[in-house]
Amino acid sequence: MNQAKPEQKDAGLTEKQTLEKALGAGHWSLLNTLMQKVLIFGTFFITARILTPGDFGTIAIIAIVPSLIDALTALSFESAVVQKKNGDEKQYLNAIWTFNILRSLVMFSAIFFVAPYVANFFHSTDGMLIFQLSGLVILIQSLGNIGQVYFFRDLNYKKVFLRDFATYATISIVSIAGALYFRSYWALFYANVLGAVSGVAVSYALHEYRPRLDIRLSKLRALLPYSQWIFGQSLLGQIARTLEDSLVAHFTNTTEVGLFTKAKGLANAPTSPVVSLINKISFAAYSRVQESLDHVREGLHKSYDLILVIALPFLAAIIIAGHRIIAILLGSQWLDITTNLKVLTIAATIDILTVTLAGPAFNALGKPRIQFLVHGIYLSVLIVALIILVPTHGTFGASIAMLLSSMIAGIYSITRLHKLVRLSFKKIIETTTVVSIAVLLPLPLTAWLLNFPFANSTLGFLLLGAMTGLSYVGIITFFGRMYGKGPHNTLLVIAGSLRTRLNR
């Protein structure tokens, strides 16, 4: 059967066209991530009142081994294809697809047979069957259309949005319906399996490329020089997550694991759309203008503006009113999450402003080894801290270990990034100052209003949050228009580009 001709990478784009294309992709990526977070956390807020923290802990535990094996064997060939400029990627696609299927089959078999040992280690022998089936999602995902690489290479994130919407909408519907029916962690498991099936089906509907088996895997060696560093970054990141969850699960119980993993998820909730935009869009955009460090540096400054304007107010809200927020959103059975949530939010904020900000630039500029070293430093600090703190302090010890790792890795990352592109610390300080003032100025009035009973009701608390948010936006707008300082101009560029695209 003849292969459909894949889309070709845009060539000869001007810097302005590259910016417009990146911004357009960024809008779809941002919309995609917002959609995912609305569905994920909306579903969680509903199912959290039906299921127990232990149910979520069980699902988190069964994902530990599949995620680790996936990271150990994922060689990131897709990223290498996206990064290539010479247009000869077609010869690799079928081999990559075949490799992914064979890899996932071996993974599923290995997970099935080691499941009894894993269940014993985590003291969860009652859930043996779900441990044995825990590799099913990865096996299904490997069948997806390899033509999806063109979505990322051509910055066609509208198709990525459609694929992911099908996946997460399915997960949400099945999770809620299953929670009401099963009242157990099986609802979440079935939701993930059916979500994977939906995503695979839509990937074939969205791209005409039809992969076929190609066992000439030796040709993939040509992609290894680049992909080995991307593979190393992913591997170290996954090892870090595996250590966190494994030690917590071994020394505590499923309830504590559920609380800890959801605290990690909530700590990243508001900023994860920006993280997704940076990881997916900046890499491709920086790759296109990698010869101009001035444009890369400007992109980094705009990324910092966008990150900080979201991350800092959320951090302040969690530190000041985290207990109330959890009680309103999740209910009293989740209140034990509060302390860890505060520490993990600080860690997440540091991480996104340093390691996450710098990663796409290192990779796009042909310096993936630096980002690999950053992950290596993070992992080294994390291993030592976890071994010392988790046995004696449980989940709180794990949270502190993540905070220490983020601080040390972040310092190294920003230091190396500055040497590479010469960041303007003047601009960074200006943005930080304006956003900090915008966060701090409304706080005295907010704290005073919290003394009134109405402000502590669900409706009153939400109205108070909305009022504080409007004040925050107003202060940032004031500094931008009056003094030309802060993230205001960056936000205007993004809003203007979005308005232009909507009017087309």
Image (spheres, rainbow, N blue to C red):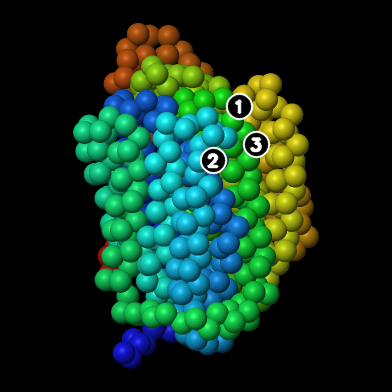
Residue 202 position in % (x across, y down): 28, 65
Q: Is residue 218 above or below residue 373?
A: below
What residue sits 59% from the left and 30% below the top? 250
- Residue at far bottom of view: 2
Give the mark, 3 or 1, whose residue is nearer the N terminus: 1
Note whether residue 147 is visible: yes
Give the camera-side residue of 36 and 97.
Answer: 97
Answer with left or right where residue 306 lies relative to residue 469: right
**Alpha carbon of mark 2 to alpha carbon of mark 1: how far?**
14 Å
Q: Which residue is mark 3?
A: 402
Closer to us: 320 or 439? 320
Residue 260: % across, % down: 52, 30
Q: Quadrant of the C terminus?
A: bottom left
Q: Nearer the viewer, mark 3 or mark 2?
A: 2
What amino acid type is highlighted by mark number 2? Val
Q: Are marks 2 and 1 in contact (CB under 8 Å)?
A: no
Identity, as a three-letter code, of the amino acid under mark 1: Phe
- Quadrant of res 121: top right
The residue where tag 2 is placed is: 118
Find residue 251 and name its label. Answer: 1
Q: Earlier in the sequence, mark 3 or mark 2?
A: 2
Name the foreground residue: 102 vs 263: 102
User: How far apart are labels 3 and 1 at the CA level?
Assistant: 17 Å
Whether residue 422 is situated above or below residue 12 in the rendered picture = above
Name the image quarter holding residue 369: bottom right
Classify mark 3: helix, strand or loop.
Answer: helix
Q: Which label lies toward us, 3 or 1? A: 1
